[in-house]
Image (spheres, rainbow, N blue to C red):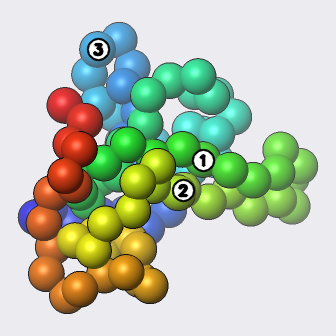
Amino acid sequence: MATYNKTGCEVRINGAWQPVSLTEAHTQHRAAEKRCPSCHGRVHTQGSYSAQGTVAMTHRRAHDGCPRIPKLYAGTSKPHPQVVD
């Protein structure tokens, strides 16, 4: 699987997947479809809009093949069962 940026996700912009920071995805692309850059599963962002707030990415459906879910990761990267293309 591809390497990934721990502070970003992919957002569908004009029909193409673009890598963006979590803050940008959360504030500027709130309604856009988002996916994990590691497993390509559907995600959403959550957090604060304040300058000091933090933004996090959460998988809509967790699975054990994504290294971005440390509590569930089984040690082998694999695509999400519900890949978003």
Residue 42 locus on image (x, y percent): 38, 43
Residue that numbered label 2 is attached to = 57
Read off the residue under disc 1: 45
Q: Name the amino acid type tagged 3.
A: Gly
Is the Cβ of the residue at disc 2 closer than 8 Å to that at disc 1? yes
Q: Earlier in the sequence, mark 3 or mark 2?
A: 3
- Residue 11 location, quadrant: top left
Q: Secondary structure under badge 2?
A: strand
Q: Residues within 10 Å of mark 1 (few under 14, many from 20)?
A: some
Tell me the residue at 39%/62% (across/down). Answer: 62
Q: Where in the figure is residue 23, as x and y percent of width and height? A: 64, 47
The local secondary structure at tag 3 comes to: loop
Between marks 3 and 2 in the image, the one whose residue lies nearer the viewer? 2
* Left or right: residue 40 compared with residue 33: left
Q: Are marks 3 and 1 in contact (CB under 8 Å)?
A: no
Q: Quadrant of residue 49?
A: top right
Along the polypeptide, which appears first: circle 3 or circle 1? 3
Which label was assigned to residue 34? Answer: none
Q: Which residue is mark 3?
A: 15
| Quadrant occupied by the C terminus | top left
Q: Residue at x 43, y 36 (%)?
A: 34
